[in-house]
Amino acid sequence: MPRAERERQMLDAAVEIIGRHGYTAASMDDIAELAGVSKPLVYLYLNSKDDLFTACIRREAAALTRAVHAAVRPDRPAERQLWDGVQAFFTYTAEHPDGWTVLHLQARTHGPRFAAEADVMRAELAAFVTRLIATAARESQPARDLSEHEVAGLAMALIGAAESLADWANTTDGVTAAQAAGTLMNFAWSGLGNLMAGNRWTAPDTG
């Protein structure tokens, strides 16, 4: 069997076991058994448990970002681009719950080295959403005065909401990826749409 295919099997097994049992409880013996290889071969290919975990995070992050990018067509309106990207995000996280757990829970709770790997993915998605919102603002006369910080903040708020909603959807019976995507758009685009139309929220007078 080619090395790349053997390594894929090891990463598949590691993602499943870490996603379901946690990084601390995951054993190299269990990973090797699920992959159908010997434990020494896992160490030969991936050096250590930490390096194996890092490889899992990088692979899952790359796959998720590819799925989102592939779904978005730049020739479509900003609202449609965001909808397509949101649908792709929730479809991927629903179809790969162990991978999402590795990325969003396990990577962020087992030390700065692993959190930094997950942060790379988050930053890429945030930059992508920032560009979408900035494009929408440029195309809307009332929203052209949005500052760079406002646009970036809106993108980070949307990313944070998407991550929390994906966690909830994956652990709540009966919630589909399409429903989660629709919930986020109802939450986010209603506000963004108002901004694009020049309708800003202002703090109530508390005097």
Image (cartoon, grey):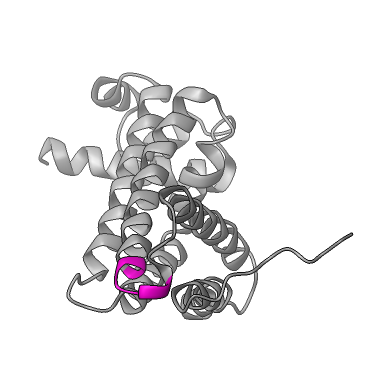
Above or below residue 99? Residue 199 is: below
Could you tell me which residue is drawn at 58 percent across and 77 percent down?
175
Q: Which region of the structure is painted magenta?
A: 136-142
Q: Left or right: where does residue 21 sit relative to residue 126?
A: right
Q: Quadrant of residue 21?
A: top right
Count of all numbered marks drawn on residues in the image: 0
Above or below residue 99? Residue 109 is: above
- Residue found at the far front of this picture: 207
Above or below residue 110? Residue 161 is: below
Return the residue nearer the eye: 197 or 38.
197
Q: Quadrant of residue 123?
A: top left
Residue 196 location (% of width, % of height)? 44, 74
Specify the quadrant that holds the N terminus.
Answer: top left
Q: Left or right: where does residue 1 sit relative to residue 76?
A: left
In the rendered image, is residue 31 in sight? yes
Residue 171 location (% of width, % of height)? 63, 63
Residue 115 location (% of width, % of height)? 49, 32
Above or below residue 203? Residue 12 is: above
SS assignment for the magenta stretch, majority: helix
Residue 79 location (% of width, % of height)? 36, 77
- Residue found at the far left of this picture: 2
Could you tell me which residue is drawn at 49 percent across and 75 percent down?
198
Could you tell me which residue is drawn at 42 percent across and 74 percent down?
142
Return the residue nearer the eye: 182 or 12.
182
